[in-house]
Amino acid sequence: MAPVLAIEGLVRRFAPDRPPVIQGLDFALGAGEYVAIMGESGVGKSTLLNLIAGLDRPDGGRIVLEGTDLAALDDEALTLTRRRRLGFVFQAFHVLPYLTVGQNVALPLELLGTDAATRDARVAGMLEAVGLTAFASRSPRELSGGELQRVAIARALVHRPRLLLADEPTGNLDPTTARQVLALLKARVGAEGGAGILITHSVAAAETADRIYRLDGRALVPIKAG
């Protein structure tokens, strides 16, 4: 079976007179796999995530998402691919304050033009999965940090993406809430049948993944094998 994500010879540099941030990196991720990537600040973790998400363009190599070479897509096609196949969970939540919890979760489906009946059923199911059914009509301003992160997880998974990207999703949370969010994140990735990448500085967070890698710019070095 072809991998969900295949990275081949990836290169990214920000100035011609400086060493590349990422040089010749290869990596593959299969369906059902949930991995963590660690590394020092400035080593290129967020750069790698932005490249995988198609938010940045590589200077060399390929990023192939389910057989589609992202570099071969124009901006419009890349945006559509992101909407359909990727889900994002970020440290800062990025929950829209002027929408209710339910409307925030529904947003990816709205952007994809999903019919109302399917949209409502998916949103209800995801809110139930993250324990926020009673919060559907509430404003994000009424929620705690842990609740906001659960909204972000529900929104990232409601359209059933093939690849979930989580960038320091527990950095603003207390340890107890962080453990709950990480357990939920892993469980929902598995339930949706896709694959997931967790970027983190936290050893405790990384330990929840099936495999752990350290990014050194040229390779993702295995730390913990699944």
Image: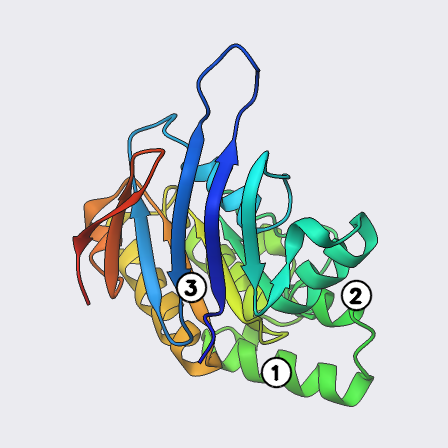
Q: Closer to us: mark 2 or mark 1?
A: 2
- The image shows residue 38 at horizontal and vertical percentages of 29, 42
Q: Circle 3 sits in a helix, a strand or a loop, which is it?
A: strand
Q: Residue at x 79, y 48 (%)?
A: 75
- The image shows residue 66 at horizontal and vertical percentages of 57, 69
Q: Circle 1 sits in a helix, a strand or a loop, which is it?
A: helix
Residue ID for mark 1: 124
Binning the other alpha carbons within 10 Å of mark 1 as few (below 14), some (14 to 19) or many (20 upward) gives some
Horizontal side of residue 193 vs 222, given as left or right: right
Q: Closer to us: mark 1 or mark 3?
A: 3
Q: Earlier in the sequence, mark 2 or mark 1?
A: 2
Residue ID for mark 3: 196
Q: How is the image coloured?
A: rainbow
Amino acid type of the residue tagged 1 in the rendering: Ala
Amino acid type of the residue tagged 2 in the rendering: Leu
**Alpha-carbon span between mark 1 and mark 3:** 23 Å
